[in-house]
């Protein structure tokens, strides 16, 4: 409920000023997924973006700076909202409800759907596909080049692979194998330690198991200001690990860096490279 309320607050602040009535424009684009939002704003001028997902205006789920997200109209993703904007193209997740996609197409909207990239290579291909869909292949290549440069810069200084465990949010959910962040960890010179605890895919791992047998590195979100339950759990987990007798490096890894790929890969690889260097020193 709190997450929904935050999203509604962000949406309300973005829509405080009267918005002009939408005009049909085949050059305008609506994105209904936060990961697609982050890529889209890198590829086309702001004037071509009719709306982005409301998730991108919630700091807890966004993969772009709040100031950037607030420049755009946001929708909650309902078919009615998107259709009313009369875009020439809708970018949607492959997990979008079939009835919603059918409604778009029934009313003549062009829809391009995209799945979740599980590797940097898959994300690179997806960026190029999105860039072709919006008519911006050159900008797509520029974004891919930035990502490739960041990945190359993050290459580890030696062959050692310190074990690393990435906790998601304040829950006991840890990142498993077969995910984009798992691939990024490997490119930065880490070994995903989740399988050491029997977690082969992203899943729940009790804190007690990790305290008893900690990996070399634990990646955890930064504690947010305030005293909400999630922040309290992050703090307690960090304190428990810091008090363990085995040496473990605790590195803060912002939540926004593991939601999506696209431009987010650049700061994510930079952060992982810095942590890998810290372990090596």
Image (cartoon, rainbow, N blue to C red):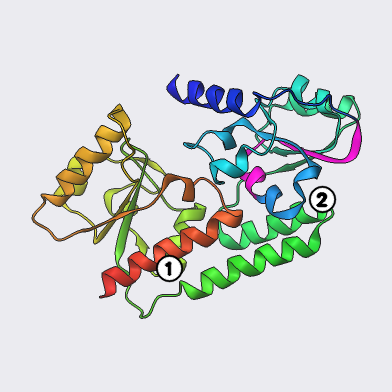
Provide the residue designation for mark 1.
Answer: 188
Instruction: Farthest residue to the bottom: give it.
Output: 158
Rendered location of residue 185, percent (x, y): 42, 61
Residue 40 against residue 69 in the figure, above or below? below
Snapshot quadrant of residue 86: top right
Residue 83 position, x and y percent, is 82, 25
Is residue 183 something that shows in the picture?
Answer: no
Q: Which residue lies at the image location 45% right of the left edge and 65% below the top edge?
A: 270
Q: How many numbered marks have been drawn onto this rendered protein structure?
A: 2
What are the residue bounds of the magenta stretch? 24-38
Find residue 222 and report its horizontal and vertical position in percent: 33, 46
- The answer to whether residue 199 is above or below residue 278 is above
Q: Which mark is residue 133?
A: 2
Residue drawn at the location 30% of the way across and 31% of the way down: 226
| Element marked by disc 1 | loop
Q: Quadrant of the N terminus?
A: top left
Q: Where's residue 258, x and y in %? A: 47, 49
Q: Quadrant of the C terminus?
A: bottom left
Q: Which numbered disc, 1 or 2, marks the residue that appears first in the sequence?
A: 2
Residue 167 disc label: none
Q: Residues within 10 Å of mark 2 (few under 14, many from 20)?
A: some
116 on left or right of 110: left
- For marks 1 and 2, give the CA distance: 31 Å
109 with respect to 214 (left or right): right
Q: Which residue is the extreme one toward the front?
A: 17
Residue at position x 26%, y 34% in the image: 233
Q: Does 72 sit above or below residue 38?
A: above
Q: Quadrant of residue 25?
A: top right
The answer to the question of whether label 1 and label 2 lie on touching residues, with beta carbons closer than 8 A, is no
Q: Determine if the magenta segment contains residue 257.
A: no
């Amino acid at each position: 409920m709190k997450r929904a309320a935050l999203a509604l607050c962000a949406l309300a602040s973005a829509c405080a000023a009267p918005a002009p009535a939408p005009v049909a424009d085949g050059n305008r684009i609506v994105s209904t997924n936060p990961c697609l939002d982050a890529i889209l704003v890198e590829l086309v001028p702001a004037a071509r973006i009719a709306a982005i997902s409301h998730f991108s205006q919630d700091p807890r789920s966004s993969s772009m700076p709040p100031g950037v997200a607030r420049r755009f109209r946001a929708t909650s993703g309902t078919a009615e909202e998107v259709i009313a904007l009369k875009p020439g193209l809708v970018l949607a997740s492959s997990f979008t409800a079939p009835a919603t996609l059918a409604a778009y197409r029934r009313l003549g909207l062009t829809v391009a759907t995209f799945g979740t990239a599980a590797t940097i290579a898959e994300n690179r291909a997806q960026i190029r596909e999105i860039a072709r869909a919006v008519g911006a292949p050159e900008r797509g290549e520029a974004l891919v080049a930035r990502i490739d440069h960041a990945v190359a810069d993050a290459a580890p200084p030696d062959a050692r692979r310190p074990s690393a465990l990435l906790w998601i949010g304040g829950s006991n959910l840890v990142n498993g194998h077969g995910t984009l962040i798992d691939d990024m960890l490997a490119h930065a010179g880490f070994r995903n330690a989740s399988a050491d605890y029997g977690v082969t895919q992203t899943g729940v791992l009790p804190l007690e198991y990790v305290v008893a047998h900690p990996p070399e590195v634990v990646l955890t979100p930064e504690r947010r200001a305030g005293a909400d339950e999630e922040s309290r759990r992050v703090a307690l987990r960090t304190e428990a690990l810091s008090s363990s007798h085995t040496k473990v490096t605790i590195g803060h890894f912002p939540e926004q860096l593991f939601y999506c790929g696209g431009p987010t890969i650049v700061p994510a690889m930079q952060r992982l490279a810095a942590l890998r260097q810290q372990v090596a020193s």
